[in-house]
Image: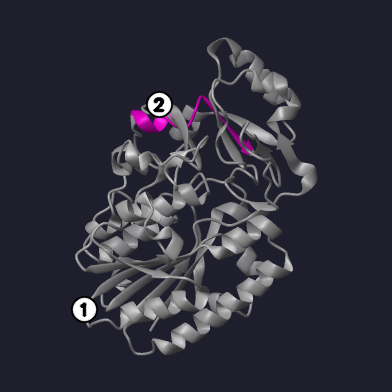
Amino acid sequence: MLKYMLLPNYKDGSVVNLMSSVGGALGAKSKYTPLKILKPDELKSAKNVVLLVIDGLGFEFLQKYGKNSVFSKHLRGKITSVFPTVTSTVVPTFFTGLSSQDHGMTGWHIFLKELGCVIRSLPYDLRTSRFSLAEVKDISSVFNLKPFTNKISCNSYVVTQKDLMNSPFSIATAGKAKRYAYTNLNGCFKTIKKVITLNSKKKFIHAYWPNFDSLCHRHGTKSKKVLTHFKQLNKEVTSFLKSIESTNTVLIITADHGMIDVPKTKRIHLKNHPLLAETLTVPLCGDWRYVYCYVKPDKTKQFARYVKKKLKHCCTLHKSKHLVKKNYFGLGKPSKKFLERIGDYTLIMKEGYALYESLAHEKGHYNKGDHGGLSKEELYVPLVVVNK
């Protein structure tokens, strides 16, 4: 298998299986088997089960820069994300326990046939105008966002950044969980501790930290700002663990995906490929390290020929339905809605490449670090388990 085309391990080694392990310990059932390296029995006796998702903290980054960190000290092993390896697909997996083909969120930009438009998924608004779709159709009727917290038998809590707390997505996926907000890194861990010590009842706490990912996007994975932030994370987690001694808490730390650097020389823009652009019926969907292409029926040969000839150095071409059959998006049969959201073809970018498109109202936007593809840097995430 190509090094930039690894396959998520939905059998017993992905974040979906992690949620099956957590759910199995807390009374929920899943069609996915529990994680091979973290069985439900290991979590059943804990008074508090805390799942901390650090956005963008990949296993390969940890291997390179975190050898003496608290993360490495308690590293259970590596697991895979799901495909696509983007927040807009994997965070819904953590909140629902479902794979991307089950919950239906296929990336940042999604063409919704039922609404006749391209949307930004997590903000749940129109790509063109930022108009909130919450006023048109409930997000839970568009995506299968049955909350994981509604499936388990204990009290549950969500700890997230203040500006994310009241989005349609956050409200829908929190379910019966009580939501707590924070404003900075120290506040994140103080809030988790506050919830742990609320009472002596059994709890599941889902916490999310987004800033590592955003720093990698802006500055690249090897930048001083990212490495400084990682040191701060290490310091905060170490201090937090000392503060929750003897609380009978299991802390699980993982990520939604890892990151890969995208140098200027590997940024491809659709505007420089007009013969490719003219074959498309709607803008490119998905994200920049993979794209879904909706192709005009009479232009399919031109599309495929162009990609194979002009872009073979930077991406691989796949019929989207073939990726489904090969279980890239999950196991089992996907819904018709899901198939409508992955286009006719999927382009998966090779190491370090990204394919951009800017619409008329958008300024050119590039990331120094990115994700979405199937390289080891993007697909593998750490599983850190600490028993307190």
Please state the horizontal and vertical placement of residue 258, each as a whole percent of the image: 58, 57
What amino acid type is highlighted by mark number 1?
Lys
Above or below residue 216? Residue 105 is above
Magenta-drawn stretch contains 342: yes
The alpha-carbon separation of the residues under discs 2 and 1 comes to 45 Å
Residue at 71 percent across and 47 percent down: it is 352
Q: Nearer the viewer, residue 136 or 281?
A: 136
Packing grade of label 1 (10 A; few <14, some 14-19, many >=20) is: few
Magenta-drawn stretch contains 160: no
Check disc 2 and report the residue beneath it.
Answer: 113
Q: Quadrant of the C terminus?
A: bottom left
Check disc 1 and report the residue beneath it.
Answer: 201
Residue at 52 percent across and 61 percent down: it is 55
Q: Nearer the viewer, residue 120 or 297?
A: 120
Q: Quadrant of the N terminus?
A: top right
Packing grade of label 2 (10 A; few <14, some 14-19, many >=20) is: few
**What segment carries the magenta color?**
336-348
Q: Give the SS element for disc 2.
A: loop
Report the side of 198 relative to 222 (left or right): left
Report the side of 131 relative to 377 (left or right): left
